[in-house]
Image (spheres, grey):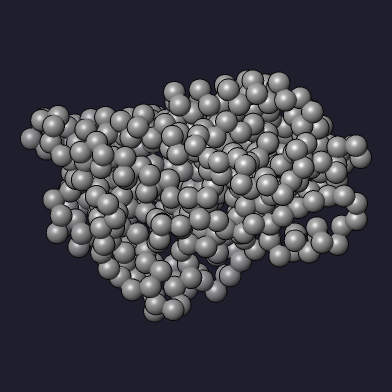
Amino acid sequence: MDQQKPLKILFLTSSYPRSEDDHAGVFLRHLAHHLCNRGLSIHVLAPSDGAAGTLTEGQVNVHRFQYFPKRMQKLAYGSGILHNLRESPSLWIQVPFFVAAMGNSLLRLARKERLDLIHAHWLIPQGLLATFSKSWHRVPVLTTVHGSDAFRLKNGLLDRIKRKVLHKCEAWTANSHATAEALGPDTATIKPHIIPMGVDVERFRKGERGRLRSGLNKDDLVILFVGRVVRGKGVEFLLDALSLLPSSLRPKIRLWVVGEGQDADRLQQRTHGASGTLKVRFWGALRNELLPDFYAAADLLVVPTSDTEGQGVVLLEAFAARLCVLATCVGGIREVVEDGVTGMLVQPGDSQALARAIAKLSTDPELRRKLTDNGFLRARNDYAWEIVAARFEDLYRGVVEKAAKGAR
């Protein structure tokens, strides 16, 4: 096979940024653009937030499908399909329409474009639809497991469906060993490729520290949380830990919460009614271009999740920004953060342990400096998008070449 052939790849996904500032599946946008920079042709099929349509973002062709009347489409985006279904069970009525619209759009796009490979992101429904559709277009399928599809969606039927998808696709990847292992022992015979999502090291290392700290005292310590403000992500656990800090340290602490979610209003009300000296600011969802400045202005990123994370992209962003990291040791976080080397880890739900770790890192700038230096090297050497995209391209070419030989 000609190694210089510009492969045409289709990303099949339930989440892809709808605008420049949208965070939904933003890591897929970064991967797509870096693959294009390597000479690949990337198409994306994702749900719309309105009418169907196709547009070109840089070199990436993004195809949007409509699955319900425009103003009623609420299944995708927001806090994610699983969370949306949990919060609004009435949305289950949209699920069959979503699956049918995605499957129909996939078949039409596969007929129109001469695809070399379909890269399905998440096992259900994307991986299932991609492998099922091979009967019509015979395009090889690579499936990536990102975490939620491994750690959740667990019952006998869904587990069988996931195993069937992994057996029928030509290859599959997971963003961490923890994600791969969460699929159970029956998948051990189908060896995964462990390829994480990446980070734009140059972008996050260039954040400007001074502007956001202009109203703070010199010795104030900013603790940053970045993520969805929903149950399981640990903001309430973090507030509990901050209330346990020594009275001599608490007045210096500023907590910045960046993100939105169903729990944001409730937690804001809690902090407004709290007594003492705890200072918390909820910034809401921010434009992507502003995030490097927030990492630069902070002294510590805390990821207090009790949910099992597949990887934790915010950890990589903090590494690249030379921001010290404190996280709970769940799922793939343990593979990103090496305790005492690139960050600190505590057990989820242990507010006393989290408070002790915050106090130690807040009062030991030399330890923070050591951890941030190691974290930056880890981001640059293992997680830069250029490295991750090259690994995916190598895998794409291997899968396509093997499929072509098998078809002869």
**87, above or below 168, in the image:** below
In the image, taking residue 190 as reference, residue 303 lies left or right, namely right
Which residue, as the protein is rendered here, is positioned at the far left? 408
Q: Nearer the viewer, residue 323 or 41?
A: 323
Q: Is residue 385 visible?
A: yes
Instruction: Indicate the position of residue 56 as horizontal and vertical percent values.
Output: 25, 58
Q: Measuring 92% from the left and 40% from the top, which residue is drawn there?
A: 247
Quadrant of the rendering where the N terminus is positioned = top left
Instruction: Indicate the position of residue 293 as horizontal and vertical percent values.
Output: 56, 44
Instruction: Indicate the position of residue 261 as horizontal and vertical percent values.
Output: 62, 60
Instruction: Indicate the position of residue 281 as horizontal and vertical percent values.
Output: 72, 55
In the image, taking residue 4 as reference, residue 60 lies left or right, namely right
Q: How many marks?
A: 0
Q: Measuring 33% from the left and 35% from the top, which residue is drawn there?
A: 389
Q: Is residue 136 visible?
A: no
Q: Nearer the viewer, residue 124 or 202?
A: 202
In the image, taking residue 160 as reference, residue 167 lies left or right, namely left
**93, above or below 359, in the image:** below
Q: Measuring 58% from the left and 70% from the top, which residue is drawn there?
A: 88
Q: Measuring 48% from the left and 62% from the top, which residue is drawn there?
A: 77
